[in-house]
Image: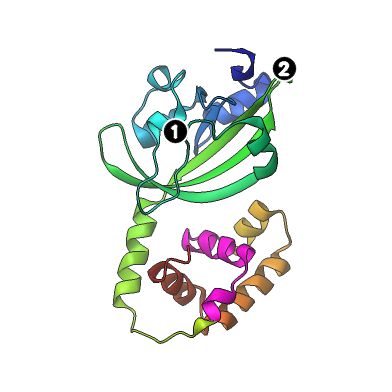
Amino acid sequence: MNRACNGIKDPVLGRTLARAVDGVFIVCAEGTVVMWNRAAERILGYSARSAVGRLSCELLSGGPEGQRLCYHGCHDAPLISTIGFRTFDVHTSTKAGKPIWLNVSAVGIASPDGHGCLTVHLLRDVTAAKRLLGVISERMPARRYGPVAHALTRREREILGMLSLGLSTKNVADRLHVSRTTVRNHVQSILAKLGVHSRLEAVAYATSNRLI
């Protein structure tokens, strides 16, 4: 493992990530796992001993329904510098082979020694939420929607994805580093464009039409 694969050196931050309720793992610029907390072990079944030192794409590979999380070369420094903070869903499987949906937040940071970059991933198991949305979508009365759905902006689609996870206005605002008023304005725009009357209906429509 070269210098670019050094983990986070800040002891306070390191302890915070290790004890986090959410799953946390860190990869270096080469895509190799350099840190794996207990929550990640609980969610995916891989111990820190078996995960650290392996390529992240060996541990999590996106299925046909979800975005691919990692791949060879995906954590090269030039790419990380343009990604910044992002949130997306991944359909993968646990060590035991159980299918699972994960909501993943990823942020690229500079390596402590100044050589290369690290990517910190926070993940949550949202399998139950995905199943619930599927049931809601199937049981809601069929409606005809116009082409206005295509007018959703990238930020509106991002907020729709967060709403699908049950996040509140405050949670969304905190994640996006914007005011609650800004989030409410985006939500109202989403409802108007989709021709629906509630967040639940907007999420159901977005799920059934693969907008998120």
- Decide if residue 84 is in sight here: no
For residue 13, side relative to residue 147 (left or right):
right
Q: In the rendered structure, which segment of residues is drawn in magenta?
A: 148-167
N-term-proximal mark, 2 vs 1: 1
- Decide: few, some or many residues near mark 1? Use Cα within 10 Å; few <14, some 14-19, many ≥20: many
Q: Nearer the viewer, mark 2 or mark 1?
A: 2
- At 71% from the left and 53% from the top, the residue drawn is 177
**What residue would you read off at disc 2?**
113
- In terms of image quadrants, where is residue 182? bottom right
Position in image of residue 67 (x %, y %): 45, 49
As helix, strand or loop, the secondary structure at mark 1 comes to: helix
- At 58% from the left and 33% from the top, the residue drawn is 120
- Decide if residue 130 is in sight here: yes
Q: Which amino acid, mark 1?
A: Ala
Q: Residue 126 in magenta?
A: no
For residue 167, side relative to residue 181 (left or right):
left
**What residue would you read off at disc 1?**
39
Seen in the picture, residue 74 relative to 167 is either above or below; the reply is above
Q: CA distance from mark 2 to mark 1?
A: 27 Å
Q: Residue 165 in magenta?
A: yes
